[in-house]
Image (spheres, rainbow, N blue to C red):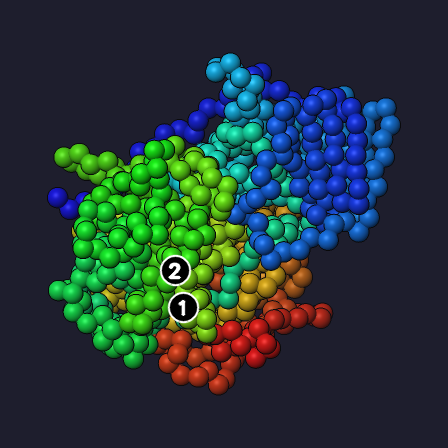
Amino acid sequence: MELLGRPATFSDPPALKDPQGFTTLGAITAVEHDKATVTLHCGEARLRLLLLTDDVVRLRVAPPGASFGRDFSYALDPGTTWHGPSALTVEENDAIVRIQTGALTIQTEKTTCRLQILDATGRILFADEAGPAWENAGSNGTDTVSHVALSARLRPGERLFGLGDKTVTLDRRGHRFALWNTDAFEYQRGTDPLYKSIPFLLSLHDGAACGLFVDTTQRMTVDLGAEANDRLRVEAPGSALDYYVLAGATPLAVLQQFARLTGRTPMLPKWALGYHQCRYSYRNEGEIREVARELRARRIPCDALYFDIHYMDGFRVFTWDRDAFPDPAGLIADLKQDGFQSIVIIDPGVKADDPAYGIARAGHAHDAYIKQPDGSPYTGKVWPGACHFPDFTNPAVRDWWGPLHAELLKQGVAGVWNDMNEPAVFIEDLEEATAITMPEDLRHDYDGHPTDHAEVHNAYGMQMLRATYEGLLRLAPERRPFTITRAAYAGTQRYGTTWTGDNTSSWDHLKLAVEQCLSLSVSGTPFVGADVGGFVGTPDGELLARWTQLGALMPLFRNHTTLGTPPQEPWVFGEEVERICREAIELRYRLLPYFYTLLWEAATDGLPMLRPLALPHPADETIRREAPLGFYLGSSLLAYPVLDAGQIQMNAYLPPVPGGWYDVHTGRHHPGDGGTVVPVETPLDRLPLFVKAGSIVPFQPVLQHVEENPVEELTLHVYPTPGAFTARLYDDAGVGWAFKNGD
């Protein structure tokens, strides 16, 4: 039986444990400090504050009898150097310990060790409720710490954003979530958990912004006022609590701090910003050649075509089905000649039951696989059947995995797509295959810190992508790798791109695409997208047209659908829909200089390409109250995608900016610095798009693919208003690394 679907099992996020069963720090008995570190002793427990800069503080908790835990994290960017605060003073009296940097004041009650962090104007950014706490195992008669927790105060009107790809509104306040990477096939609004675990929150309150990052890869429960409206509570297994509070003058500045902490996206090849066409699966050479021919004949620009799992021989990774694809190198060369980059899927499962399969044998020879507690390789079932799974937390295994892509690169493959890397395995019955996760007692190397799968799970997909990215970079050091992953942890953006997984062809999922991509952008992952048209199910022409218009404004722009559905290419839905999709894709290509500049800003400055309205306008009461699903693309463009069937008019809220806004399509100026609602006509061929007064937006000629012709002339669209304004434009060769030398 071929598995047509793999519906995941879901449950409500785990209930919080009884806070009464947790122990908090208690009274401060001693204070130690140096130029950048303050340690507060609370009897046998300790709270250590490491001031990384004037406005970034790391807090580590050591319960009685426990250490601060390993000073090791996959999330942190190893390329970032922290120089400490510009100045640090520590004062104490009978009531408080006061710690001051050039930007923050940290006040800690002596009787409880509860702290609050204030900015330079005295606004509270972060405040403990009960603060850090821990639960002893107890049941086995020991004092071993089994769980840690952190509870902080939530204030009236405080908004919370982040946590990655969650399927609720952008403001997470009032919800509880599980962070546990899960293959969430056909997820719906409210499904939890999903594919990514990014324990970062952005708080907005009273015009001030603050970030909270709890750095643990363990299964985490995050309650944002669901149980108690005035309390944020985080719980996770383990004995170490390691978290960061990040301040900044603006919400964007806080996100830049988080990017500095966990890393920025690499510069991608320019073609990554083009339109991508995918299907699960184009089953043979003829099908994918036909799609390529239609795209070019119909003058629909496209830069990349994807090979899903059916290109492989029995789903064995790093192989080709030579009956369906007899000459991969010739096929890929022909596609390349027509301007198409080829991207192949690689899953983590290595088929285990075939002694003739060289990759499987090599994995055993390299001792590469995740182990059961008895030391034998773990076996789980995915698409090839029984599989072993490389332990990507072992650097030797990552070094082995990367070069396995050599033959694919030799054949002309331009990018690699890592899927099923939550990691997912199947339990089969007669009717369906259900995706589950691996047993939590499996053993991993964890970069020399041996541990179990419970600790590794949320970082597994990230480390697979790392192995892929670093392997491609070693194999072809002159090329910028293109990689895409479904599962992620904080910091995954250092190794490539991601998307929102197995969504559905529905209008609600069109809304979710906006919410999820904006949330991932807030969570430090700038190059994101959602499957255009929806992966599961079949869109009608109107939905595909609207989704293509939205996709044209997302960093990753890919049309993708699942096995057993009708074709989903733009021409399938008739001439009008084909025209509308073509025009949306052409707009994307005309705006490529703008998009490429945004990619460069993300790679160099850590600025998100997509921005919820609340980021540039944190004090705007209309945005806070009505939460419109418009969004900024960079700092100049404001989009209001059409998200409802049959909608031919909308009221768009234009936030207050000096000089007002211009309509990109009509050139009409909407003056007013105080924010205004304007009626906008939205026929099927119109996506409302506005540009901020004072902006200069570069447009280029339409290309059928990025490398079709050298772009020798740009048209600068100037949107004037009195005053002095600047605009950025970045360009380079679009491939390679010469830009690092100023080329």
- Identity, as a three-letter code, of the amino acid under mark 2: Gly
Q: Is residue 534 left or right of residue 354?
A: right
Figure check: 37 above or below 588: above
Tag 1 and tag 2, C-beta contact below 8 Å = yes
Q: Secondary structure at mark 1?
A: helix
Picture quarter with the N terminus:
top left
Picture quarter with the C terminus:
bottom right
Crowd around label 2: few <14 · some 14–19 · many ≥20 (10 Å)? many
For image coordinates 44% across by 26% down, the residue present is 14
Frontmost residue, 506 versus 395: 395
For image coordinates 18% across by 50% down, the residue present is 354
Q: Secondary structure at mark 2?
A: helix
User: Which residue does the numbered mark 1 point to in the structure image?
Assistant: 475
Q: Counting residues from the N terminus, which is met first, the one under dot 1 or under dot 2?
A: 2
> Does residue 227 appear anywhere in the picture?
no
Frontmost residue, 407 versus 340: 407
For image coordinates 44% across by 48% down, the residue present is 394
Query: Residue 266: x, y in percent?
Result: 51, 63
Figure check: 178 above or below 647: above
Figure check: 553 above or below 199: below
- Identity, as a three-letter code, of the amino acid under mark 1: Leu
Q: Quadrant of residue 287?
A: bottom left
Figure check: 163 above or below 400: above
Q: Is residue 683 left or right of residue 595?
A: left
Frontmost residue, 429 versus 319: 319
Frontmost residue, 667 versus 192: 192
Q: Is residue 531 left or right of residue 655?
A: left
For image coordinates 15% across by 46% down, the residue present is 2
Disc sitting over residue 402 in the figure: 2
